[in-house]
Protein backbone atom coordinates (compact mmCIF):
# COMPACT_ATOMS: atom_id res chain seq x y z
CA UNK A 1 0.00 0.00 0.00
CA UNK A 2 2.76 2.38 1.01
CA UNK A 3 4.71 1.45 -2.09
CA UNK A 4 1.66 2.20 -4.18
CA UNK A 5 1.27 5.55 -2.48
CA UNK A 6 4.92 6.38 -2.98
CA UNK A 7 4.57 5.31 -6.56
CA UNK A 8 1.53 7.54 -6.96
CA UNK A 9 3.26 10.54 -5.55
CA UNK A 10 6.44 10.01 -7.51
CA UNK A 11 4.69 9.56 -10.78
CA UNK A 12 1.75 11.84 -10.23
CA UNK A 13 2.78 14.15 -13.03
CA UNK A 14 3.14 11.37 -15.53
CA UNK A 15 0.79 8.79 -14.10
CA UNK A 16 -1.53 8.92 -17.08
CA UNK A 17 0.06 7.19 -20.01
CA UNK A 18 -0.80 8.45 -23.46
CA UNK A 19 -2.84 5.33 -24.10
CA UNK A 20 -4.90 5.90 -20.95
CA UNK A 21 -5.43 9.53 -21.86
CA UNK A 22 -6.71 8.56 -25.29
CA UNK A 23 -8.81 5.56 -24.39
CA UNK A 24 -10.00 5.67 -20.78
CA UNK A 25 -10.09 9.17 -19.33
CA UNK A 26 -13.23 10.98 -20.32
CA UNK A 27 -12.67 13.97 -18.03
CA UNK A 28 -11.47 17.07 -19.89
CA UNK A 29 -7.71 17.38 -19.68
CA UNK A 30 -7.80 20.76 -17.93
CA UNK A 31 -9.37 19.10 -14.88
CA UNK A 32 -6.70 16.39 -14.61
CA UNK A 33 -4.40 18.38 -12.30
CA UNK A 34 -7.33 19.06 -9.95
CA UNK A 35 -8.28 15.38 -9.67
CA UNK A 36 -4.64 14.34 -9.40
CA UNK A 37 -4.21 16.77 -6.51
CA UNK A 38 -7.39 15.51 -4.85
CA UNK A 39 -6.17 11.90 -5.17
CA UNK A 40 -2.80 12.89 -3.79
CA UNK A 41 -4.36 14.68 -0.78
CA UNK A 42 -6.65 11.71 -0.10
CA UNK A 43 -3.74 9.26 -0.22
CA UNK A 44 -1.69 11.59 1.99
CA UNK A 45 -4.40 11.71 4.67
CA UNK A 46 -4.99 7.96 4.37
CA UNK A 47 -1.30 7.38 4.79
CA UNK A 48 -1.29 9.60 7.90
CA UNK A 49 -4.01 7.58 9.62
CA UNK A 50 -2.42 4.28 8.60
CA UNK A 51 0.95 5.33 10.02
CA UNK A 52 -0.63 6.92 13.10
CA UNK A 53 -1.85 3.58 14.41
CA UNK A 54 1.08 1.45 13.28
CA UNK A 55 3.89 0.84 15.77
CA UNK A 56 6.63 1.75 16.48
CA UNK A 57 5.45 5.15 17.70
CA UNK A 58 7.69 8.19 17.40
CA UNK A 59 7.21 9.44 20.97
CA UNK A 60 10.39 11.51 21.21
CA UNK A 61 9.89 13.19 17.84
CA UNK A 62 6.23 13.84 18.71
CA UNK A 63 7.10 15.46 22.05
CA UNK A 64 9.73 17.57 20.31
CA UNK A 65 7.09 18.81 17.88
CA UNK A 66 4.66 19.50 20.76
CA UNK A 67 7.36 21.65 22.31
CA UNK A 68 7.99 23.52 19.06
CA UNK A 69 4.35 23.98 18.08
CA UNK A 70 2.92 24.46 21.56
CA UNK A 71 5.46 25.85 23.99
CA UNK A 72 7.27 28.03 21.47
CA UNK A 73 3.97 29.63 20.40
CA UNK A 74 2.82 30.46 23.94
CA UNK A 75 4.29 33.95 24.09
CA UNK A 76 2.96 35.08 20.72
CA UNK A 77 -0.48 33.57 21.29
CA UNK A 78 -0.61 34.95 24.84
CA UNK A 79 0.25 38.52 23.87
CA UNK A 80 -2.08 38.51 20.87
CA UNK A 81 -4.96 37.03 22.83
CA UNK A 82 -4.48 39.51 25.68
CA UNK A 83 -4.49 42.44 23.28
CA UNK A 84 -7.56 41.06 21.50
CA UNK A 85 -9.38 40.77 24.84
CA UNK A 86 -8.64 44.39 25.75
CA UNK A 87 -9.53 45.74 22.31
CA UNK A 88 -12.76 43.75 22.07
CA UNK A 89 -14.02 44.76 25.52
CA UNK A 90 -13.09 48.43 25.05
CA UNK A 91 -14.71 48.57 21.63
CA UNK A 92 -17.88 46.82 22.82
CA UNK A 93 -18.29 48.87 25.99
CA UNK A 94 -19.59 52.15 24.48
CA UNK A 95 -22.35 50.34 22.55
CA UNK A 96 -23.44 48.44 25.64
CA UNK A 97 -23.30 51.60 27.77
CA UNK A 98 -25.52 53.37 25.22
CA UNK A 99 -28.18 50.71 25.74
CA UNK A 100 -27.67 50.63 29.50
CA UNK A 101 -26.39 47.09 29.21
CA UNK A 102 -22.97 47.71 30.68
CA UNK A 103 -23.35 44.78 33.07
CA UNK A 104 -23.61 42.44 30.10
CA UNK A 105 -20.04 43.16 29.08
CA UNK A 106 -18.47 40.08 30.80
CA UNK A 107 -21.05 37.79 29.20
CA UNK A 108 -20.66 39.51 25.86
CA UNK A 109 -16.88 39.18 25.89
CA UNK A 110 -16.99 35.60 27.18
CA UNK A 111 -19.32 34.39 24.43
CA UNK A 112 -17.30 36.12 21.73
CA UNK A 113 -13.96 34.91 23.05
CA UNK A 114 -14.92 31.30 23.76
CA UNK A 115 -17.09 30.70 20.71
CA UNK A 116 -15.07 32.45 18.06
CA UNK A 117 -12.37 34.96 18.92
CA UNK A 118 -10.04 32.66 20.88
CA UNK A 119 -10.12 29.71 18.47
CA UNK A 120 -9.79 31.95 15.42
CA UNK A 121 -6.95 34.06 16.79
CA UNK A 122 -5.03 30.95 17.85
CA UNK A 123 -5.60 29.13 14.58
CA UNK A 124 -4.73 32.10 12.39
CA UNK A 125 -1.56 32.84 14.32
CA UNK A 126 -0.58 29.18 14.12
CA UNK A 127 -1.26 29.27 10.38
CA UNK A 128 1.28 32.01 10.05
CA UNK A 129 3.81 30.72 12.53
CA UNK A 130 3.48 26.94 12.63
CA UNK A 131 2.27 26.11 9.12
CA UNK A 132 4.89 28.25 7.39
CA UNK A 133 7.58 26.80 9.65
CA UNK A 134 6.61 23.19 8.99
CA UNK A 135 6.17 23.71 5.25
CA UNK A 136 9.48 25.54 4.91
CA UNK A 137 11.32 22.93 6.96
CA UNK A 138 9.92 19.93 5.09
CA UNK A 139 10.24 21.52 1.67
CA UNK A 140 13.89 22.39 2.36
CA UNK A 141 14.44 18.78 3.30
CA UNK A 142 12.69 17.66 0.12
CA UNK A 143 14.67 20.04 -2.08
CA UNK A 144 18.01 18.99 -0.58
CA UNK A 145 17.05 15.29 -0.88
CA UNK A 146 17.14 14.76 2.89
CA UNK A 147 13.71 13.11 2.75
CA UNK A 148 14.90 10.84 -0.06
CA UNK A 149 17.97 10.00 2.04
CA UNK A 150 15.69 8.98 4.92
CA UNK A 151 13.56 6.97 2.52
CA UNK A 152 16.47 4.97 1.10
CA UNK A 153 17.86 4.21 4.54
CA UNK A 154 14.50 2.65 5.47
CA UNK A 155 13.87 5.18 8.25
CA UNK A 156 10.23 5.83 7.30
CA UNK A 157 10.36 9.62 6.96
CA UNK A 158 6.59 9.96 6.59
CA UNK A 159 6.07 8.66 10.08
CA UNK A 160 8.98 10.57 11.56
CA UNK A 161 8.37 13.90 9.84
CA UNK A 162 4.70 14.06 8.90
CA UNK A 163 2.74 12.00 11.44
CA UNK A 164 4.49 13.60 14.42
CA UNK A 165 3.87 17.13 13.14
CA UNK A 166 0.21 16.66 12.22
CA UNK A 167 -0.51 14.93 15.52
CA UNK A 168 1.32 17.59 17.53
CA UNK A 169 -0.58 20.39 15.75
CA UNK A 170 -3.89 18.59 16.29
CA UNK A 171 -3.24 18.26 20.03
CA UNK A 172 -1.43 21.53 20.75
CA UNK A 173 -3.77 23.97 19.00
CA UNK A 174 -6.76 23.15 21.27
CA UNK A 175 -4.46 23.59 24.28
CA UNK A 176 -3.19 26.90 22.92
CA UNK A 177 -6.80 27.96 22.37
CA UNK A 178 -7.67 27.31 26.01
CA UNK A 179 -4.62 29.37 26.96
CA UNK A 180 -5.65 32.15 24.55
CA UNK A 181 -9.24 32.16 25.87
CA UNK A 182 -8.00 32.43 29.45
CA UNK A 183 -5.65 35.30 28.70
CA UNK A 184 -8.26 37.11 26.62
CA UNK A 185 -10.78 36.96 29.45
CA UNK A 186 -8.18 37.99 32.03
CA UNK A 187 -7.09 40.97 29.95
CA UNK A 188 -10.69 41.86 29.33
CA UNK A 189 -11.32 41.84 33.08
CA UNK A 190 -8.32 44.10 33.68
CA UNK A 191 -9.53 46.46 30.99
CA UNK A 192 -13.05 46.56 32.41
CA UNK A 193 -11.71 46.85 35.95
CA UNK A 194 -9.71 49.96 35.10
CA UNK A 195 -12.82 51.76 33.82
CA UNK A 196 -15.57 50.26 35.96
CA UNK A 197 -13.94 48.91 39.11
CA UNK A 198 -15.47 45.48 38.57
CA UNK A 199 -14.99 42.73 41.06
CA UNK A 200 -12.98 39.70 39.85
CA UNK A 201 -15.50 37.19 41.23
CA UNK A 202 -18.44 39.06 39.77
CA UNK A 203 -16.81 39.33 36.36
CA UNK A 204 -15.94 35.65 36.13
CA UNK A 205 -19.25 34.53 37.63
CA UNK A 206 -20.93 36.40 34.77
CA UNK A 207 -18.46 34.85 32.34
CA UNK A 208 -19.16 31.26 33.43
CA UNK A 209 -22.90 31.86 33.66
CA UNK A 210 -22.99 32.96 30.05
CA UNK A 211 -21.00 30.17 28.45
CA UNK A 212 -22.50 26.72 28.19
CA UNK A 213 -20.93 23.27 28.10
CA UNK A 214 -21.77 23.14 24.39
CA UNK A 215 -19.81 26.37 23.84
CA UNK A 216 -16.71 24.87 25.40
CA UNK A 217 -17.01 21.47 23.73
CA UNK A 218 -17.86 23.05 20.38
CA UNK A 219 -14.97 25.46 20.63
CA UNK A 220 -12.42 22.80 21.55
CA UNK A 221 -13.75 20.37 18.96
CA UNK A 222 -13.36 22.81 16.12
CA UNK A 223 -9.83 23.66 17.19
CA UNK A 224 -8.96 19.98 16.88
CA UNK A 225 -9.97 20.27 13.22
CA UNK A 226 -8.13 23.59 12.92
CA UNK A 227 -4.99 21.92 14.25
CA UNK A 228 -5.35 18.95 11.94
CA UNK A 229 -5.91 21.23 8.95
CA UNK A 230 -2.88 23.37 9.80
CA UNK A 231 -0.62 20.35 10.33
CA UNK A 232 -1.89 18.41 7.33
CA UNK A 233 -1.77 21.32 4.89
CA UNK A 234 1.70 22.39 6.03
CA UNK A 235 3.09 18.86 5.87
CA UNK A 236 1.47 18.17 2.51
CA UNK A 237 2.81 21.37 0.97
CA UNK A 238 6.26 20.78 2.42
CA UNK A 239 6.52 17.05 1.81
CA UNK A 240 5.55 17.35 -1.85
CA UNK A 241 7.34 20.61 -2.57
CA UNK A 242 8.70 21.01 -6.06
CA UNK A 243 12.42 21.20 -6.58
CA UNK A 244 14.43 24.37 -6.08
CA UNK A 245 14.35 27.30 -3.71
CA UNK A 246 11.21 28.58 -5.43
CA UNK A 247 9.52 25.39 -4.23
CA UNK A 248 10.35 26.24 -0.60
CA UNK A 249 8.78 29.69 -0.89
CA UNK A 250 5.74 28.34 -2.68
CA UNK A 251 5.28 25.61 -0.07
CA UNK A 252 5.45 28.05 2.86
CA UNK A 253 3.16 30.55 1.19
CA UNK A 254 0.72 27.85 0.04
CA UNK A 255 0.61 26.36 3.53
CA UNK A 256 -0.34 29.69 5.14
CA UNK A 257 -2.91 30.71 2.53
CA UNK A 258 -4.57 27.29 2.29
CA UNK A 259 -4.66 26.65 6.03
CA UNK A 260 -6.12 30.11 6.72
CA UNK A 261 -8.80 29.52 4.10
CA UNK A 262 -9.57 26.08 5.55
CA UNK A 263 -9.84 27.52 9.05
CA UNK A 264 -12.68 29.80 7.97
CA UNK A 265 -14.40 26.96 6.09
CA UNK A 266 -14.14 24.70 9.16
CA UNK A 267 -15.38 27.53 11.39
CA UNK A 268 -18.40 27.98 9.16
CA UNK A 269 -19.17 24.25 9.14
CA UNK A 270 -18.62 23.97 12.90
CA UNK A 271 -21.05 26.83 13.46
CA UNK A 272 -23.74 24.95 11.51
CA UNK A 273 -23.16 21.77 13.53
CA UNK A 274 -23.12 23.58 16.90
CA UNK A 275 -26.24 25.57 15.99
CA UNK A 276 -27.97 22.30 15.14
CA UNK A 277 -27.23 20.93 18.64
CA UNK A 278 -27.97 24.17 20.48
CA UNK B 1 7.37 -6.10 -29.59
CA UNK B 2 10.91 -4.80 -29.44
CA UNK B 3 10.73 -4.92 -25.62
CA UNK B 4 9.59 -8.51 -25.63
CA UNK B 5 12.53 -9.49 -27.80
CA UNK B 6 14.95 -7.91 -25.38
CA UNK B 7 13.30 -9.62 -22.42
CA UNK B 8 13.54 -12.97 -24.20
CA UNK B 9 17.21 -12.34 -24.83
CA UNK B 10 17.87 -11.61 -21.12
CA UNK B 11 15.56 -13.56 -18.83
CA UNK B 12 14.46 -11.93 -15.54
CA UNK B 13 15.67 -14.84 -13.46
CA UNK B 14 19.26 -14.37 -12.45
CA UNK B 15 21.20 -17.10 -14.16
CA UNK B 16 24.54 -16.04 -12.76
CA UNK B 17 24.90 -16.04 -9.01
CA UNK B 18 27.36 -13.21 -9.20
CA UNK B 19 24.79 -10.86 -10.83
CA UNK B 20 23.33 -8.79 -7.99
CA UNK B 21 21.57 -6.12 -10.01
CA UNK B 22 19.71 -6.91 -13.21
CA UNK B 23 17.89 -4.11 -14.96
CA UNK B 24 15.99 -5.02 -18.09
CA UNK B 25 14.64 -2.67 -20.66
CA UNK B 26 13.42 0.10 -18.39
CA UNK B 27 11.56 3.12 -19.66
CA UNK B 28 10.84 6.25 -17.68
CA UNK B 29 9.20 9.49 -18.75
CA UNK B 30 8.23 12.65 -16.89
CA UNK B 31 5.29 14.05 -18.81
CA UNK B 32 6.41 14.27 -22.40
CA UNK B 33 10.08 14.09 -21.51
CA UNK B 34 11.47 10.63 -22.15
CA UNK B 35 14.32 10.09 -19.71
CA UNK B 36 15.11 6.37 -19.97
CA UNK B 37 14.40 4.50 -23.16
CA UNK B 38 14.98 0.80 -22.83
CA UNK B 39 18.03 0.68 -20.57
CA UNK B 40 19.34 -2.76 -19.62
CA UNK B 41 22.42 -3.57 -17.57
CA UNK B 42 23.70 -5.75 -14.77
CA UNK B 43 26.04 -5.38 -11.83
CA UNK B 44 28.19 -8.24 -10.62
CA UNK B 45 29.15 -8.97 -7.05
CA UNK B 46 32.24 -7.03 -6.01
CA UNK B 47 32.20 -4.93 -9.16
CA UNK B 48 32.23 -1.15 -9.55
CA UNK B 49 30.10 -0.11 -12.53
CA UNK B 50 30.38 3.47 -13.66
CA UNK B 51 27.45 5.00 -15.48
CA UNK B 52 28.95 7.76 -17.55
CA UNK B 53 27.04 10.44 -19.36
CA UNK B 54 26.23 14.11 -19.69
CA UNK B 55 23.89 15.83 -17.26
CA UNK B 56 20.24 15.14 -18.00
CA UNK B 57 20.77 11.75 -19.63
CA UNK B 58 18.83 9.91 -16.94
CA UNK B 59 21.73 8.59 -14.85
CA UNK B 60 20.29 9.64 -11.47
CA UNK B 61 16.81 8.49 -12.47
CA UNK B 62 18.32 5.11 -13.27
CA UNK B 63 19.75 4.53 -9.79
CA UNK B 64 16.66 5.94 -8.10
CA UNK B 65 14.73 3.15 -9.84
CA UNK B 66 16.98 0.61 -8.11
CA UNK B 67 15.88 1.67 -4.61
CA UNK B 68 12.22 2.41 -5.33
CA UNK B 69 12.58 6.18 -5.10
CA UNK B 70 11.21 6.24 -8.63
CA UNK B 71 9.40 3.53 -10.52
CA UNK B 72 9.98 2.87 -14.20
CA UNK B 73 7.01 3.02 -16.54
CA UNK B 74 8.09 -0.28 -18.08
CA UNK B 75 10.79 -2.90 -17.62
CA UNK B 76 12.07 -4.88 -14.68
CA UNK B 77 14.49 -4.15 -11.86
CA UNK B 78 15.96 -6.99 -9.86
CA UNK B 79 18.27 -6.19 -6.96
CA UNK B 80 19.84 -8.88 -4.74
CA UNK B 81 17.34 -11.37 -6.06
CA UNK B 82 14.31 -9.18 -5.33
CA UNK B 83 12.03 -7.70 -7.95
CA UNK B 84 11.94 -4.08 -6.75
CA UNK B 85 8.71 -3.30 -8.58
CA UNK B 86 6.79 -6.02 -6.77
CA UNK B 87 8.12 -5.54 -3.24
CA UNK B 88 5.77 -4.51 -0.44
CA UNK B 89 6.90 -1.67 1.90
CA UNK B 90 8.45 -4.09 4.40
CA UNK B 91 10.33 -5.92 1.66
CA UNK B 92 11.44 -2.66 0.09
CA UNK B 93 12.78 -1.37 3.41
CA UNK B 94 14.62 -4.65 3.98
CA UNK B 95 16.21 -4.33 0.55
CA UNK B 96 17.06 -0.67 1.08
CA UNK B 97 19.05 -1.60 4.18
CA UNK B 98 21.38 -3.58 1.90
CA UNK B 99 21.90 -0.63 -0.42
CA UNK B 100 23.85 2.50 0.46
CA UNK B 101 22.67 5.48 -1.56
CA UNK B 102 24.99 8.48 -1.68
CA UNK B 103 23.31 11.61 -2.96
CA UNK B 104 24.90 14.21 -5.15
CA UNK B 105 24.73 16.91 -2.46
CA UNK B 106 25.31 14.37 0.34
CA UNK B 107 21.80 15.07 1.73
CA UNK B 108 23.02 15.30 5.34
CA UNK B 109 20.27 16.11 7.84
CA UNK B 110 21.14 19.70 8.58
CA UNK B 111 19.32 19.89 11.90
CA UNK B 112 21.48 17.08 13.33
CA UNK B 113 25.17 16.86 14.18
CA UNK B 114 27.42 14.54 12.18
CA UNK B 115 27.17 11.93 14.94
CA UNK B 116 23.37 12.15 15.00
CA UNK B 117 23.29 11.87 11.20
CA UNK B 118 25.10 8.55 11.48
CA UNK B 119 23.08 7.34 14.46
CA UNK B 120 19.76 8.15 12.82
CA UNK B 121 19.46 5.16 10.42
CA UNK B 122 20.81 2.82 13.09
CA UNK B 123 18.49 4.01 15.86
CA UNK B 124 15.46 3.77 13.62
CA UNK B 125 16.24 0.41 12.08
CA UNK B 126 17.76 -1.37 15.09
CA UNK B 127 15.80 0.00 18.04
CA UNK B 128 17.32 -2.43 20.51
CA UNK B 129 20.88 -1.18 20.01
CA UNK B 130 22.50 0.15 23.18
CA UNK B 131 24.13 3.58 23.41
CA UNK B 132 27.51 1.86 23.63
CA UNK B 133 26.90 -0.11 20.44
CA UNK B 134 25.68 2.99 18.65
CA UNK B 135 28.71 4.91 19.81
CA UNK B 136 31.07 2.21 18.58
CA UNK B 137 29.36 1.94 15.18
CA UNK B 138 29.43 5.73 14.66
CA UNK B 139 33.11 5.96 15.59
CA UNK B 140 34.01 3.08 13.28
CA UNK B 141 32.12 4.60 10.36
CA UNK B 142 33.68 8.02 10.92
CA UNK B 143 37.16 6.51 11.21
CA UNK B 144 36.64 4.60 7.97
CA UNK B 145 36.27 7.91 6.13
CA UNK B 146 38.99 9.61 8.17
CA UNK B 147 36.72 12.10 9.92
CA UNK B 148 36.48 10.86 13.51
CA UNK B 149 36.98 14.41 14.83
CA UNK B 150 33.83 15.79 13.15
CA UNK B 151 31.31 13.91 15.29
CA UNK B 152 29.97 16.96 17.10
CA UNK B 153 30.04 19.32 14.15
CA UNK B 154 26.96 20.44 12.25
CA UNK B 155 26.80 19.70 8.50
CA UNK B 156 26.96 23.44 7.80
CA UNK B 157 30.43 23.51 9.38
CA UNK B 158 31.81 20.93 6.93
CA UNK B 159 33.51 21.46 3.58
CA UNK B 160 32.11 19.89 0.40
CA UNK B 161 34.58 17.01 0.50
CA UNK B 162 33.88 16.35 4.17
CA UNK B 163 30.16 16.30 3.51
CA UNK B 164 30.68 13.70 0.78
CA UNK B 165 32.73 11.58 3.16
CA UNK B 166 30.16 11.85 5.95
CA UNK B 167 27.48 10.89 3.43
CA UNK B 168 29.48 7.77 2.58
CA UNK B 169 30.01 7.02 6.30
CA UNK B 170 26.26 7.32 6.90
CA UNK B 171 25.59 4.66 4.30
CA UNK B 172 28.48 2.44 5.40
CA UNK B 173 27.15 2.32 8.96
CA UNK B 174 24.35 0.02 7.75
CA UNK B 175 26.94 -2.35 6.19
CA UNK B 176 25.40 -2.36 2.71
CA UNK B 177 26.13 -4.87 -0.02
CA UNK B 178 25.72 -2.36 -2.82
CA UNK B 179 26.81 1.27 -2.84
CA UNK B 180 25.21 3.77 -5.18
CA UNK B 181 27.12 7.00 -5.72
CA UNK B 182 25.32 9.85 -7.46
CA UNK B 183 27.94 12.24 -8.89
CA UNK B 184 30.39 11.69 -6.01
CA UNK B 185 32.90 14.28 -7.26
CA UNK B 186 30.59 17.02 -8.49
CA UNK B 187 31.39 20.43 -7.07
CA UNK B 188 34.74 19.34 -5.66
CA UNK B 189 38.22 20.61 -6.46
CA UNK B 190 40.48 18.11 -8.30
CA UNK B 191 42.45 17.19 -5.17
CA UNK B 192 39.36 16.47 -3.07
CA UNK B 193 37.74 14.70 -6.03
CA UNK B 194 40.78 12.42 -6.23
CA UNK B 195 40.48 11.68 -2.50
CA UNK B 196 36.81 10.77 -2.92
CA UNK B 197 37.65 8.52 -5.88
CA UNK B 198 40.24 6.76 -3.77
CA UNK B 199 37.76 6.42 -0.94
CA UNK B 200 35.26 4.75 -3.29
CA UNK B 201 37.89 2.20 -4.31
CA UNK B 202 38.91 1.76 -0.65
CA UNK B 203 35.30 1.12 0.39
CA UNK B 204 35.00 -1.57 -2.28
CA UNK B 205 38.15 -3.31 -1.09
CA UNK B 206 37.53 -2.96 2.64
CA UNK B 207 33.79 -3.70 2.76
CA UNK B 208 33.63 -5.98 -0.32
CA UNK B 209 30.75 -3.99 -1.75
CA UNK B 210 29.65 -3.67 -5.33
CA UNK B 211 28.92 -0.15 -6.53
CA UNK B 212 27.25 1.85 -9.24
CA UNK B 213 28.92 5.21 -9.68
CA UNK B 214 27.00 7.85 -11.59
CA UNK B 215 29.33 10.46 -12.98
CA UNK B 216 30.25 12.77 -15.83
CA UNK B 217 33.79 13.05 -14.48
CA UNK B 218 36.20 11.06 -16.68
CA UNK B 219 38.88 10.80 -13.97
CA UNK B 220 36.29 9.47 -11.52
CA UNK B 221 35.17 6.91 -14.11
CA UNK B 222 38.75 5.86 -14.80
CA UNK B 223 39.72 5.54 -11.12
CA UNK B 224 36.63 3.91 -9.67
CA UNK B 225 35.17 1.84 -12.51
CA UNK B 226 35.84 -1.81 -13.27
CA UNK B 227 33.37 -1.45 -16.09
CA UNK B 228 31.89 1.62 -17.78
CA UNK B 229 28.43 2.02 -19.20
CA UNK B 230 27.97 5.12 -21.33
CA UNK B 231 24.49 6.60 -21.37
CA UNK B 232 23.11 9.22 -23.75
CA UNK B 233 19.56 10.34 -24.43
CA UNK B 234 18.28 7.67 -22.07
CA UNK B 235 19.94 4.81 -23.96
CA UNK B 236 23.04 2.74 -23.37
CA UNK B 237 25.59 3.72 -26.00
CA UNK B 238 28.46 1.50 -25.07
CA UNK B 239 29.57 -0.81 -22.31
CA UNK B 240 33.03 -2.16 -21.48
CA UNK B 241 36.27 -1.31 -19.75
CA UNK B 242 37.40 2.32 -19.64
CA UNK B 243 39.82 1.69 -22.50
CA UNK B 244 37.15 0.04 -24.65
CA UNK B 245 34.61 2.78 -24.08
CA UNK B 246 37.15 5.55 -24.64
CA UNK B 247 37.94 4.17 -28.13
CA UNK B 248 34.37 4.62 -29.30
CA UNK B 249 33.56 6.56 -32.45
CA UNK B 250 30.09 7.59 -31.31
CA UNK B 251 30.01 11.40 -31.61
CA UNK B 252 28.30 12.01 -28.24
CA UNK B 253 30.77 9.80 -26.43
CA UNK B 254 33.86 10.74 -28.39
CA UNK B 255 33.37 14.40 -27.57
CA UNK B 256 33.13 13.39 -23.94
CA UNK B 257 36.54 11.73 -23.94
CA UNK B 258 38.21 14.35 -26.09
CA UNK B 259 37.20 17.14 -23.73
Image: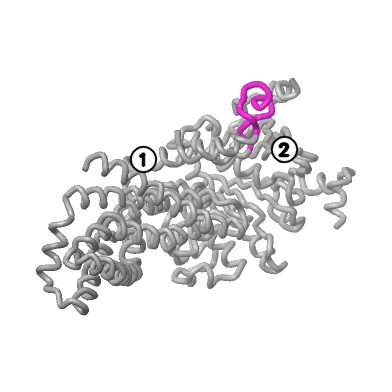
Q: Which mark is residue B97?
A: none
To which chain does the residue with label 1 belong?
Answer: A
Residue A200 painted magenta = no
Residue A21 painted magenta = yes
Residue located at (60% from left, 44% from top): B64
User: Which of A168/B70 is in front?
Assistant: A168
Question: How many residues crowd mark 2 within 10 Å: few (<14), some (14–19), many (20+)?
Answer: few
Residue located at (45% from left, 41% from top): A44
To which chain does the residue with label 2 belong?
Answer: B
Q: Secondary structure at mark 2?
A: loop
Residue, far bottom: A194
Residue located at (35% from left, 54% from top): A169
Residue A93 horizontal/vertical position (percent): 26, 69
Residue range of the region highlighted in magenta in the rendering: A14-29
Residue, far front: A99
Disc 1 marks which residue? A49
Question: How many residues crowd mark 1 within 10 Å: few (<14), some (14–19), many (20+)?
Answer: few
Q: Is residue B22 above or below residue B46?
A: above
Give yes or no for contact between labels 1 and 2 (Cβ–Cβ under 8 Å).
Answer: no
User: Is label 1 on the same chain as label 2?
Assistant: no
**On-image quarter of the C terminus of chain B:** bottom right
Disc 2 marks which residue? B32
B118 with respect to B227 (left or right): left
Amino acid sequence: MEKELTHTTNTISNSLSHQEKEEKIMIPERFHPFFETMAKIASFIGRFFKNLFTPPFETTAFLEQCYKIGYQSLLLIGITAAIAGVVFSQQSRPSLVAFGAQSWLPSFVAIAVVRSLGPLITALICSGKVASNIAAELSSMRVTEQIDAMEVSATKPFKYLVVTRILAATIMIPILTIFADTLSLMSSFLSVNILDQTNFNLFFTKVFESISFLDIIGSISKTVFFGFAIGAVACYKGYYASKGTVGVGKAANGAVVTSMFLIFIIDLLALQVITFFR
Amino acid sequence: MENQLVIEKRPVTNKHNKEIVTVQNIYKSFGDKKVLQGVSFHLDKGENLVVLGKSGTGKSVLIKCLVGLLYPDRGSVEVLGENVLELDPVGLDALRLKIGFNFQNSALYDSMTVGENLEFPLKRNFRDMTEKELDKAVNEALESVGLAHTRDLMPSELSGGMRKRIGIARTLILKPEIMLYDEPTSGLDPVTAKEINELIVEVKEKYHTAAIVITHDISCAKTTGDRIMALAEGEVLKEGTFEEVSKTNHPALKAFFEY
